[in-house]
Image (cartoon, rainbow, N blue to C red):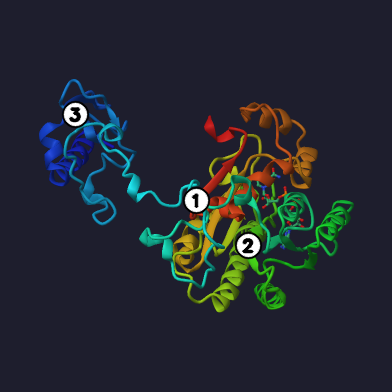
Amino acid sequence: MSASRSMTCLRQQVRLARSALPHLHARAQSVRVPLSAGVPITYPRQLSTSSYLLSSDKKDKATYKGKDSGRPQGAHPTKHEARPVSSGEPVAEHVKEDESKRAGLPEEPLEGPPPRHSEPDAYHDGTTAAPLAGLAAPDLFSLKNRTIMITGGGRGLGLTVAHALLEAGASVACMDLLPEPSQPQWSKAEELAKSKGLKITYHPLDVTDQNAVSKLFAELFEADSDDQPIRGLFTSAGIQIMMPAVDYSTDKFRKVIDVDLTGTFLCAQAFAKEWFKRHPTMDGQAGVGGASIAMTGSMSGHIANLGIECAAYNASKAGVNQLAKNLALEWSRKGIRVNTLSPGYIRTALTAAQLDEKPELNEIWLKGSLLGRLSTPDEFRGPVLYLLSDASSFMTGADLLVDGGHCAT
Ligand SMILES: NC(=O)c1ccc[n+]([C@@H]2O[C@H](COP(=O)([O-])OP(=O)(O)OC[C@H]3O[C@@H](n4cnc5c(N)ncnc54)[C@H](O)[C@@H]3O)[C@@H](O)[C@H]2O)c1
């Protein structure tokens, strides 16, 4: 960008900020910011990237106001309404919590069972304790009295998560392209389910086949029981093709997008259709009585991986992250929370194939890990339990990055 264009943009930002925050503008300090072309300009402090608002009173400390505080308000007029700052005092020091308005804290145990999803949203008016308030912390992660569907549940991450869900009290329906699930893990899962009086079932499925997906999801929802209704979906089916971008055939590129992104979408869509048929009035209650979809994205949806060429995979995973945000926007008020899990490198059959093809990858990948190691599938049991359970009741449209610190550098 040329220096004169930079100046014009900055002037526009300053004008917007002045019109949106006149009271702040009057008090704002200024800093001098050198442009790359060497022409210094005066720049109001509330537009700086640090997002700190400084009071003109020298005694005041800087108060962190969040990363949007300094934005020109005109950019998002509805979302970022201008808010008066009355005193300039640090908020945490002068606003004391009003004890009479506290609700839903652990010291207020819930009387009776949590409201069913069909009941009115009583706790929002402050007269009733919040539905999770009476649960001890470990119970927040319980998946009792529900069934969870898993794509890619025939092996790897999906099957490991299936074990964890059984341990947390859920019945599980696993779907996968494999005609049979991997042994001996599957037999162990069956034994575990039996010992706990739960069910684990296996259903061969190609997630890219919309008719097959719709049919199977309809059948599974039809067959679920009142004491263990379907309330969650974990999508783990995925493929990876390593190949220089210039060598991709259209078929290969489409295949990856088809399984990883379109397949994820088709399963989420089939889940939502069945859910909405059975739960037509769930406005605002996705967090407690509702359902949760956790989609497996990847840290590769955020970064390009050193050492491997996998443009299609990374594009598909970035697509999964964005897909989840959009589905969350459409479905969260109708009872379904949607989030993504973005794992770093996991030792599974998928990465074993990559390491066989290129053994030097191991060292390259380890260098990127702040923990100095790759992960194992069991390390994602906690994150997935969190996403599928009521522990994450206020989380939707978000990504849970569990990558051993890879993306931090
Ligand atoms: N292994 C890693 O390092 C890593 C890292 C980040 C994200 N992930 C993601 O985690 C998920 C699980 O991967 P994994 O490492 O367990 O690999 P995996 O190959 O062991 O498991 C993937 C499963 O998806 C199934 N599958 C493939 N195509 C399918 C289709 N068309 N329909 C239905 N099922 C299909 C496979 O049969 C397999 O059982 C994938 O989405 C993967 O992209 C893996």
391 above or below 114? Answer: above
- Asked whether residue 39 appears in the rendered view, the answer is no
* Residue at (22% x, 48% y) in the render: 73
Task: Decide: is 295 above or below 378.
Answer: below
What is the spatial separation of the Cα atoms under label 3 and label 1, in whole angstroms?
Answer: 33 Å
Residue 220, percent across and down?
Answer: 71, 73
For badge 3, the amino acid type reads: Ser
Ligand 1 within 8 angstroms of badge 1 C-beta: no
Which residue is tagged 3?
55
Query: What residue do we see at 55% from left, 62% from top?
Result: 112
The crowding category of the residue bearing disc 3, from other C-alpha atoms within 10 Å (few below 14, some 14 to 19, many at least 20), is some
Three-letter amino acid code at the position of disc 1? Ala
Q: Amino acid at mark 2?
A: Gly
Circle 2 residue: 232
Which of 14/165 is in front?
A: 165
Q: Are marks 1 and 2 in contact (CB under 8 Å)?
A: no
Mark 2 lies on a secondary structure that is strand
User: Residue at coordinates 64% horizontally, 40% vertically from top-left?
Assistant: 344
Q: Residue at x 57, y 55 (%)?
A: 390
